[in-house]
Amino acid sequence: MRLKHQGIGMADTTETPGLAVQSSLGGDLMDRLRRSAEYVVIPLLALVFSGLLFSIFLLSLGKSPVDFFSLVWRGGFGTSFSWQNTLVRSAPLVFTALCVAIPARLGLVIIGGEGALVLGGFAAAAIAVPMIDWAPSFLILGVMAIAGMLAGGLWIGCVGALRHYRGVNETIASLLMFYIAVSILNFFVEGAMRDPSDPNKPSTRPIGSDNMIGVIPGTDVHWGLLVGVVLCALLYLLMNRTTFGFAAQIAGGNLRAAKAQGLPVGRLVVVSCAIAGACAGLAGFFEVAAIHGKANASLIAGYGFTGILVSFLARHNPLVIIPVAFFLGGIAASGGLIQRRMDLPDATVLVLQGLLFLVILVSETFYGRFSIFKSKGGTQ
Amino acid sequence: MSKFEFSRRTILKSSAAGLAALSSAGFPRLAHASDLTVGIVYVGPRDDFGWNQAHAVAAAALKAVPGVTVVEEENVPETIAVQKSMESMINLDGAKLIFATSFGYYKPFVLDVAAKYPDVEFRHAAPLWTEGDPKNAGSYFGYLDQAHFVDGVAAGLSTTSNKLGFVAAKPIGTVLRNINSFLLGARKVNPEATVQVIFTGEWSMPVREAEAANALVDAGCDVLTCHVDGPKVVIETAESRGVKCCGHNASQAPLAPNGFITGAEYKWETIYKMFAADLAEGEPLPNFTGGGFDVDFVRSTPYGAGATEAAIASADAARADVKAGKPIFVGPINKQDGTQLLAAGASFDNYEPSLDQTDYLIEGVQGSIT
């Protein structure tokens, strides 16, 4: 708990991590609660405020905000079907959000997780196809998962390496490499690896329904969601309870200081990016192995980009990513119902997401501004 | 697929016959239609002047039928999202008939949901249903190449450079078939005509479509047409460059008040109303239905200002011929590589199964698949 709030957010430049660490080490329980409350109250207020802004938007369109939010509830969370709908849509977001959150601890803004997802999915399908005739399904799935993680890890790992060794901006590099990833996918599924039996939708050959990942019993939700949740917990531990995570946060707080301390900054950057890419690659693996059964252009569904929003809303905390992914999955799940019942275009939900993103980013500037959240023996 | 082709022809014919009976009766049964909720899922926006709009126009026609409620969802990607959209329509709106209108919706999503909800009927807009797929699923589609053939006839008489331009999305079967039919239409009335094709590589890539359209005009083409999801950009570019154009998927006539000749349009409302009527009557829906002008599944957009009287007369005659079953593919026809497709005197029936697997362009089409 003590270190968790030292995440590298956009507004954290005003804080000095070293001082904060010392003070919370010395603070008593009330102080810690008081300081923790800030990280709950401000996001909640931001949520409410963006809801209000969005209501004004709806009213200007002549639509009822009450109807809208009750439909969001019904479509996303109100029935058992809605919950499953929400969870299914959340699963890839958990992975792609991790692709943003892990490098963010180092102060890196990676927005090209979509590319790692696409390549991860493609690699998984590509390696499975020659195996389906002889290998048992557990072996195929295992190899697929590893291939997906390797492909995604290498992809974003390259972004990290470019950043560290060549000084290339990681945000732009990861975004542009997304387009390269799409071209690689298209090159193979429309060429050498195309399934000749399907002339109208270029895809790899199917991995076979026997080799697909099933659903969690009693639900419609595939096992990927559970893996995602476990992964969030593991990466939380990695980033908050190990020397690796500690070193990453030091490097994120002050790169020069970290170098001066002799921390292997280059390795931290590349490894963090590779872990991040592996997470997105796993998302691609589950899309292929649990949903599509083959790789094709349907992998490019925008999960990587929504994952950016999830990670920022979660302030790059792997544990918080889980509920935030459910929240955004629920909004996505209710989008259809809102279109059908309120005759609003599908972009309405995107407007809400955009407002949320903006308000949350602006709300970051309020941390440390309210004395009520400050510890008595405060840092300033 | 090949084992299935035989029965498919039978189904085509029987659905055509059933439709003829139905349309002559003017859908009187719908007066007694009990409440039916129909869900329609689109992959893009409903006002794209293209594929999705063609379905949305039909949805609007279906809404006018008493007792039928239509619920629609647009911009639904070909992922688990479409499965959940369909389930949401069933669970939260009570839909009993679902039209899934994008190619990639079928496998695995329509198949999975159809197996899960045996009481709901699912129909998908591409010829993919085969024996062994769920009985409550099925395919419907229009043979748009028949309308592209008619476009080609009109275009062949509208060109002075004898160069026709075709902006195409991906080099897949249906697209290649439409290009070939367009050329055959043009060649029928103008043996000098050639079709120059540029593939954009994507179903919707407006910037590249505009570049392609401009490049074709620069190369001397004076009539443009296309096969992309939303032909808006191609038609607008043609109009602004002062050349004529033929439409695709839906009506683009309003976009080109000067140069629009005619267009190849789907008429999905024929099928949608037919299925709604069948369900209201308690009759089983066909698993496989498709056709062209003969069953009123496709149509030509009303002629625009770009159509000359000669073009109108020849296009009308060509449409009547196709409707009567006169073949489009009449030999001699060679493929681009010089190999023979049809010898002199030979012809393909307009529903020849091998045409569904078209993987070639024919001589007279300039441009490469690869």
Image (cartoon, rainbow, N blue to C red):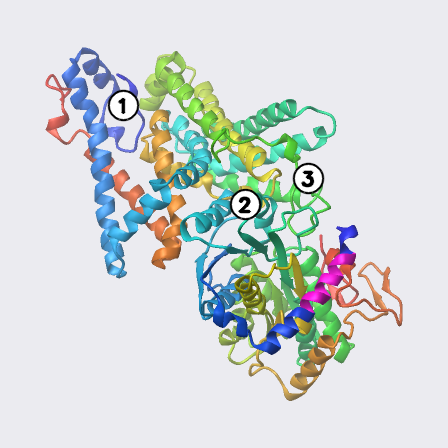
Secondary structure mostly seen in the magenta stretch: helix
Above or below for A229 versus B32: above
Residue A159 included in the magenta stretch of the image: no
Residue behind mark 1: A5
Whole-number angstrom distance, CA of label 1 to CA of label 2: 44 Å
Whole-number angstrom distance, CA of label 3 to CA of label 2: 22 Å
Q: Amino acid at mark 1?
A: His
* Image spot of residue A257 (x, y percent): 32, 18
Judged from the image, the secondary structure of the residue bearing numbered disc 3 is loop
Q: Are marks 1 and 2 in contact (CB under 8 Å)?
A: no
Residue B8 included in the magenta stretch of the image: yes
Q: Residues within 10 Å of mark 3 (few under 14, many from 20)?
A: many
State left or right for residue A370 relative to residue A278. Answer: left
- Whether residue B201 is visible: no
Residue behind mark 3: A205
Q: Which mark is residue B213?
A: none
Q: Amino acid at mark 2?
A: Val
| Mark found first going from the N terminus, 1 or 3 | 1
State left or right for residue B100 relative to residue A207. Answer: left
Q: Residues within 10 Å of mark 1 (few under 14, many from 20)?
A: some
Whole-number angstrom distance, CA of label 1 to CA of label 3: 46 Å
* Image spot of residue A371 (x, y percent): 11, 28
Residue at the location (27% across, 56% down)?
Answer: A58
* Disc 1: host chain: A
* Image spot of residue A63 (x, y percent): 27, 58
Q: Nearer the viewer, mark 1 or mark 3?
A: 3
Residue range (magenta): B6-16
Residue behind mark 2: B113
Q: Nearer the viewer, residue B362 or B274?
A: B274
